[in-house]
Amino acid sequence: MQIALTWGDWFGLFAHYLLLSLLSIGGAITTLPEMHRYMVEQQHWLSDAQFTASIAIAQAAPGPNVLFVALMGWNVGINAGGAATGLWGVCVTMLGILLPSTTLTYLAARWGHRNRELRAVRAFKQGLAPIVIALLISTGWILASAHGIFAEDWRLWLTTVIVALIIWRTRLHLLWLLGAGALLGWFGLV
């Protein structure tokens, strides 16, 4: 995939990630639906396959969850011209996603710690939980529906519901569920 980006496009990408950073309640992964809309559907800078692969590779790799942002920047840069441009893409997206959120988190954490006994602070923390859950569900929906098979395959729905119930009702470690999912996939059951 070959694209041409101007300095205005790079600035637009940086500005978009600056805004996404402020919306990333629960982590950068919660803004995936908006990243997909902007980079794949609107700008056509990444293909669906590149978008999904960026997330899969970053989540499989050890290290911080936000690595998928670097891989998306890398892929945009590679599509725009090569390895040097790929490094530029990594810098643009990572600075955009990290700069506002880390600054805001640092300042808010200091303030929240000093005022942790205030009723408003406790209410704010409790009120964020449903928002984070909804953002994670929308992220999962975008990733699952990227290849169009999720809506048609009842076995994936059933597996999703069963795993959600197991996570909710037991203290079973998630690695056991991941291993069970891998086995089901290996045997072609899902």
Image (cartoon, grey):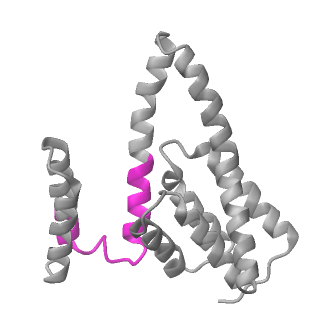
Instruction: Say if the magenta span includes residue 65.
Output: no
User: Which residue is the extreme one toward the bottom?
Assistant: 1
Q: Is residue 87 left or right of residue 10?
A: left
Percent x, y for residue 182? 20, 73
Q: Quadrant of residue 7?
A: bottom right
Q: Residue 118: percent from the left, percent from the top?
A: 50, 10
The answer to whether 18 is drawn above or below residue 48 in the figure is above
Q: Is residue 22 above or below residue 80?
A: above
- Where the C terminus falls, by quadrant? bottom left
Question: Quick check: can you spot residue 66?
Answer: yes
Quick check: 186 left or right of 114?
A: left
Q: Position of residue 50 (x, y in %)?
A: 53, 79
User: Where residue 127 sits: x, y (%)?
Assistant: 44, 27
In front: 7, or 117? Answer: 117
In percent of the image, x 57 and y 58: which residue is there? 34
Q: Which residues are magenta?
A: 135-158
| Residue closer to the observer: 93 or 12 | 93
Considering every residue shown, the one lying at the far front of the view is: 62
Q: Is residue 63 left or right of residue 74?
A: left
Q: Which residue is outermost to the top? A: 118
> Does 140 lie within the magenta span?
yes
Q: Residue at x 49, y 15 (%)?
A: 116
Quarter that holds the N terminus: bottom right
Q: Residue at x 38, y 43 (%)?
A: 133
Residue at 53%, 20% (x, y): give it: 113
